[in-house]
Amino acid sequence: MPLGARGRAWLELRHLPGVGPRVLGPLIGRLPDPAAALDDPAALEAAGLPQGSAETLARRRPGAGFHADCRWLEDPERHLLVRGDPGYPALLAAIVEPPPLLYLEGDPAAIDRGPAVAIVGSRTATRAGRDNARSFARDLAGCGFTVISGLAAGIDAAAHRGALEAGGITAAVQGCGPDRVYPAEHAALAADIAAGGALVTELPVGTPPRAAHFPQRNRLISGLSLGVLVVEAGAKSGALTTARWAGSQGREVLAVPGPINSPLSRGPHGLIREGAKLVENLADIAEELRTDRPVPSRTGHPPSLPDDLTPDQALVAENVDFQPTALDEVVAGSGLTPDRVSAILLELEIRGVVAAEPGGRFTRTPARGTPGS
């Protein structure tokens, strides 16, 4: 949306050399009228602006970054949220060193409308992990929760899609400028998120995605949320950074357990050992967040197979686990020939009972509407 004098002033200060969030943040608390302060570099220097920045400001020649931000904000669906102003999310404002400025595309109320839960996890998630994330997001969004994630491949994308399927609100926090989508293949997903929710970043226009940006982006994911749910994460996953931020911010940390021999279970299991809430169903999340928002009861138990499977189809399906299962394991468990098992697996995949995984493995697909579906 078009900038007022106040927003333009903060952007001009943000794009001065030597001014980053740690300089701009204190200035926001000390300058109730930044537009007027632009004409008094000495007063700005006294308020904490570095001397070199104040000297640059005296020449009043805003750089290319300032103009790029202003052009991006000309779209009425794009917004600049300044800490301390109405519309800045209250939950985020309560963390240590909240971002002074937020660039947002979509609906600003999406990140401050009601209770929010972050769902994060591995980029290389299994089908079962993606299904779990999608199901929890769909159910949470259906109960009126906002789903926060980071637009990454794997668990993040599944969580966003689950919320969208429920017709709910989801917001994606990015580790790049607001004019970019990362990863690029999620451009259509990002557009869907912005249409009913929000894309958010603290980084100015033109900022590329860099590894150093994502730990800081993760603090915003947790900062916007009452709690963080981790679904599949390796021992060094970035999702664990989000969980650490959540703990330091006083937010709840929740984790979905997984198979003990899966590397992607190490992250959630480690969090559970450290005191994170073990989550099997939606009620577990509501209980930990101590919200009075009603949620449907879920058993969390593996669903039964469809009633109309043939005996051989049921036998093969029962030998496919909810973690990737090799063809020879299914053959050994069922006692059928490899050719017969392969044919039945194709039939079950078409029915949506199993899903093919990389490396010629298969997983059982939980029924829609249950945790993990």
Image: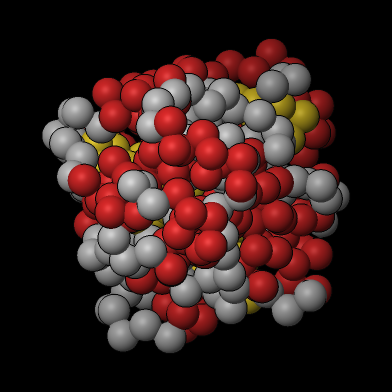
Locate residue 355 relative to residue 144 in the image: left or right. Answer: right
Provide residue 209's location: percent of width, then percent of height.
Answer: 59, 27
**Does any portion of residue 36 appear in the rendered image?**
yes
Q: Is residue 297 above or below residue 172?
A: below
* Residue 201 on image: x %, y %: 45, 42
Relative height, residue 38 to residue 303 (above, below): above
**Quadrant the N terminus occupies:** top left
Tell me residue 271's x, y (percent): 74, 67
Q: Nearer the viewer, residue 96 or 274?
A: 96
Q: Say which residue appears at 58% left-offset and 16% top-offset.
A: 343
- Tag count: 0
Question: Of residues 232 and 110, which is closer to you in this image?
Answer: 110
| Residue displayed at 67% across by 47% down | 215
Toward the viewer: 53 or 105? 53
Q: Residue at x 53, y 70 (%)?
A: 95
- The residue sitting at 58% across, 70% down in the picture is 96
The colour scheme used here is secondary structure
Residue 65, given in percent of the width and then of the height, sits at 44, 25
Q: Nearer the viewer, residue 360 or 121?
A: 121
- Asked if residue 231 can be seen in this view, the reply is no
Vertical arrangement, residue 59 with respect to residue 223, above or below? above
User: Would residue 60 appear left or right of 217 to someone viewing this image?
Assistant: left
